[in-house]
Image (cartoon, rainbow, N blue to C red):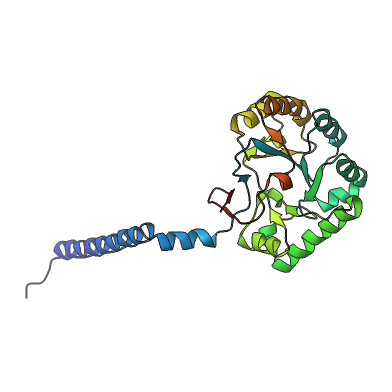
Amino acid sequence: MERLSKSRFGAFLRRRESRKGMVMFLALVALIVTVTESPAIVARASAERRIPIYCVQREDKAVSLTFDAAWGNEDTQTLIDILGKYGVKATFFVVGAWVDKYPESVKALADAGHEVMNHSDDHAHFSQLSESRIKENVNACCDKIEAVTGVRPSLFRAPYGEYDNKVIDTLDSMGIRTIQWDVDSLDWKDYDAATIYKRVTENVQPGSIVLFHNAAKHTPEALGDIIEYLQANGYAIMPVSELLLDGDYTIDHTGRQCPR
């Protein structure tokens, strides 16, 4: 047999590798098509990922204003006063360490009719905690809130907005629903009041949960105008527990709570 020259041998190897690459590519395409065209596989993949409640499917124009309180306390009473001026009840997600520092503000919130809910005990990264640590952390914060307000929280907002299936499953097992948001004011970035107002009013819709922060620099300045816009446009503003659906419901891939 004629000996292959180095150049011909190299060309032979390149053709062989090219054929192998094409076979692998076609196999991958076939796998992708199988997965994307199989409702059972898609449904199973979707079911494996747990999602908190970001917003609610409602027929009426109802929204919730929420405030995360983890550090400062400069404007709590100011927020209470603004909300009170318009007859609005909101939901405050507070950290246990914040309750330790400012129990009088926690009581003031509850006395004014606002919901005081759980935002963890120490603002930890919950996806890095074990199930038992999550329970300990959440219960510690619930104990502190209940001691001040007399009401045990039934809602939880994960610090940093971070969650995974373990976090949601653990909170579910405790009878506590995990709440996110679909409208982010980004007030923590110290945007001016006009920017905060625009972000909220341009994105709000029936069933929205709006995120603000306690001690954000320009939130008090923007809050009154936002409430006036919502009320003028027919929105009822209520605490999250009143916004949520009771009974049998599903949560779609966007985090919208929907009736079955």
Looking at the rendering, which quadrant does residue 38 occupy?
Answer: bottom left
Q: Residue at x 83, y 56 (%)?
A: 152
Q: Position of residue 5 (x, y in %)?
A: 13, 66
Q: Residue at x 46, y 60 (%)?
A: 43
Q: Position of residue 223 (x, y in %)?
A: 75, 29
Q: Residue at x 85, y 39 (%)?
A: 73
In this rendering, the answer to whether 138 lies above or below 74 is below
In the image, 106 versus 114, the foreground residue is 114
From the image, which quarter does the N terminus lie in?
bottom left
Looking at the rendering, which quadrant does residue 183 occupy?
Answer: top right
In the image, 218 versus 144, the foreground residue is 144
Q: Position of residue 96 (x, y in %)?
A: 83, 53
How many numbered discs sit on the rendered protein?
0
Q: Using the rendered image of the protein, determine whether residue 192 is visible from the camera's viewpoint.
A: no
Looking at the rendering, which quadrant does residue 40 occupy?
Answer: bottom left
From the image, which quarter does the C terminus lie in?
bottom right
Taking the image as shown, residue 17 lies to the left or right of residue 193, namely left
Q: Using the rendered image of the protein, determine whether residue 138 is visible from the camera's viewpoint.
A: yes
Q: Residue at x 62, y 58 (%)?
A: 164
Instruction: Residue at the far left: name it.
Output: 1
Q: Position of residue 107 (x, y in %)?
A: 90, 45
In the image, 172 versus 137, the foreground residue is 172
Instruction: Residue at the far bottom: name it.
Output: 1
